[in-house]
Amino acid sequence: MDKIKELFKNRNRVALLIVAVLFFWAKTMLAYYTQFDLGVTGPVQTFILWINPIATTVLLLSLSLYIKDDKKSTYTMLVIYFLMSALLYANVLYYREFSDFMTVSTITGNVGKDVGSNVSFALITSSLAMAHLSDFVYWIDFVLLFWFVRKYFKENRESESVKPFYKRYALAASLSALAMLFGNLMLAETDRPQLLTRTFDRNYIVKYLGVNFYTAYDAAQTIRTNHYRAQADESDLESVYEFTRNNYAAPNEDFYGLAEGRNVFTIVLESAQNFIIDYEMVDEEGKVHEVTPFINSIYHEDATIRFDNFFHQTGQGKTSDSGVLTENSLFGLPEGSAFQQLGGNNVFHAAPKILATNKGYSSAAFHGNIGSFWNRNNTYENFGFDYFFDANYYDMSEGRTLDYGLKDKLFFKESAAYIEQLPQPFYTKFITLTNHFPYPLDEENTTIPKGTSDDDTVNSYFQTMRYTDEALEEFFNWLKDSGLYENSMVVMFGDHYGISNMRNPELAPLLGQNPEEWSSFDNTQLQRVPMMFHIPGYTEGKTYETYGGQVDYLPTLLHLLGVNTEPYLFMGQDLLSSENDQLVPLRNGNVVTPTYQMIGSSVYDTKTGEELTDWMTEEELADFDQTVEHARARLRASDDLLSLDLLRFYEPSVLSEWTPHSYQYLNQMPSLKNHPQGAESLIGRLGVETTTDLYETNAPELQEPDLKEDEEALEEE
């Protein structure tokens, strides 16, 4: 410390820069080795990892040396150092939950504008949930630098012994940084050819070039994409059109039209992972609890077609990405959220439009949060949803909400008043919220104990998942009592993982696995989510082993409803088709098939989980490489279609009959009640004012105080 202080006494800004670079390098290494899973192997990659923070750090800090005034220059360096530290720490927090790095879209706010105080609070609490007390190590260096600089200027306020300004020092630092950066790029290109042109994994760029470089690269890519979008024309569609024609899988005649004419309830199960199906949790007292008994019962019914190798394929857009995947059979963007970046402007051939023009369906989306969150209100208009019931249509008063919106039991109960007025047949979409990270739940709503891992987030997950399960049972009971159930199809699927890769080792013992042996393969297996089509009256339902993902949902759904999908530019395939190639591209570039899995740069046997890179023959490896290339071609075709808004140049003839409505999501009840098809609504058919009196719930928020006291007394007895 004395030596550092002596350097400051001499006002040697170059020395300050060197100390700052060393400090920043040290905490970057700390993040690399303790927070990020970069997949570093071998001495070359290790060497590149160790040098990659240096060049950009020197380059950025050297900018302050061009300022002649000593005090202004020093404080400018501190400001730059603070901003770099904030960027690094923000990525640490983000990576802990999402196993990914922040993009420019994320930084500038990819959850939408004017999201409201409840969402802002949710984002703050989520960040706090990801923060650790030990994180002070990412800021102590800045505090020390700031303290030394302040102390020095205070002690030497009247001193005239100022080191002269030498512009050549600034220039030398900048040129040295550029030279180091060029050398870093050459080493990276040697070990990972075409790193910046063919990567689907941000981990690679950070591993080889560092967080600062990655952020600048991402900004450049964002600007480049916006430029190409403006320059795109109809010729850019040709290759995508040809790809989708070759990718088409014809429907299975045994299932085509199986649910034709039925109402559709699509229920998006927030953060539900496939391991939760039939999962039995043992509490600290040794008592066994079935976490999702109702979902399990629906899953195993003969009326349900279910898939147990169904993967979420979302990226940074999380739930909003699942909306792009399932409503359009397109992937989300490589960076950020398509809802936020493109949803308000792009042309989409989404489920509501297709069902309206092909089968005369009305459509509605339901979400217990404000409509601007993830830019849903604008995006749903472009998808063609006739109605969107957001927080404006629900009682969001204190005690009824959690971090990200209305509690599920209250959400489904209040939704009944709108469902009963929808013209039939209808296509509806519900997004649950209670089982959302960080999984808070008040004690009066918990009915099973927490899990027994060493991670409280993992433990709470089981309680909130159980709450959602109970809410669904109440909703199904109302569907049956109201008369909607028999003429409907209920589709349920998970939107994305609930337990992040960082927490998977804590989850491992609860799944009967050894955390010490946990691998990237195991992480990938946990990206499977529930997928079930429940068709009341159908008796031949079973579990299908077909490998697929969310991009395959829409072709499967439409074929079940008797809609021809051949005219559309879908990236997915009907899961029930005999022509389905069982190829699952994940958004990060990993590829899953029933035989092999490409995870990072390694190949695994799907059945055993063993790494096979050294065991496969050259012919087998070449065949699989071709499969991987085809999977990633799907991602590229989808990215072009979305990023360049190519659907504006293509319109299937059937969609030419579709005309956009004058959407009034904030004042839509008058038009709903006076809809020309109103007689076809549930209450119109029954000739009653409402069916909501049939809805029964045990939500404590809706019980009379004396009844709650009686129940508590019974529990005590």
Image (cartoon, helix red, strand yellow):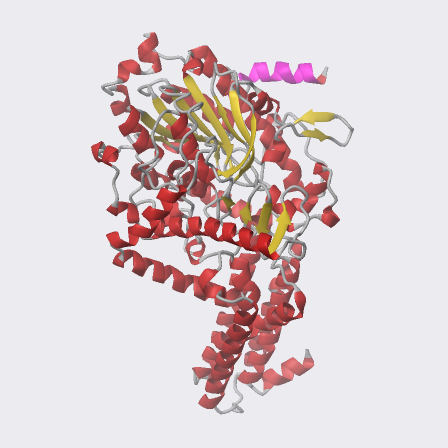
Percent x, y for residue 173? Answer: 50, 83
Prevalent SS, magenta region: helix
Quadrant in the picture for residue 222 = bottom left
Q: Please tell me whether residue 222 is drawn above or below residue 382 in the rendered image.
A: below
Residue 237 among those drawn in magenta? no
Q: Residue at x 68, y 78 (%)?
A: 1
Quadrant in the picture for residue 278 = top right
Image quarter of the C terminus: top right
Q: Please tell me whether residue 704 is drawn above or below residue 120 in the rendered image.
A: above
Percent x, y for residue 195? Answer: 50, 65
Percent x, y for residue 85? Answer: 54, 65
| Front-most of residues 624 and 653 | 624
Q: Please tell me whether residue 97 is drawn above or below residue 682 in the rendered image.
A: below
Residue 712 among those drawn in magenta? yes
| Front-most of residues 678 and 523 | 523
In the image: residue 571, left or right of residue 472: left
Q: Residue at x 58, y 83 (%)?
A: 15
Give the extent of the magenta segment: 702-715
In the image: residue 690, left or right of residue 532: left
In the image: residue 284, left or right of residue 172: right
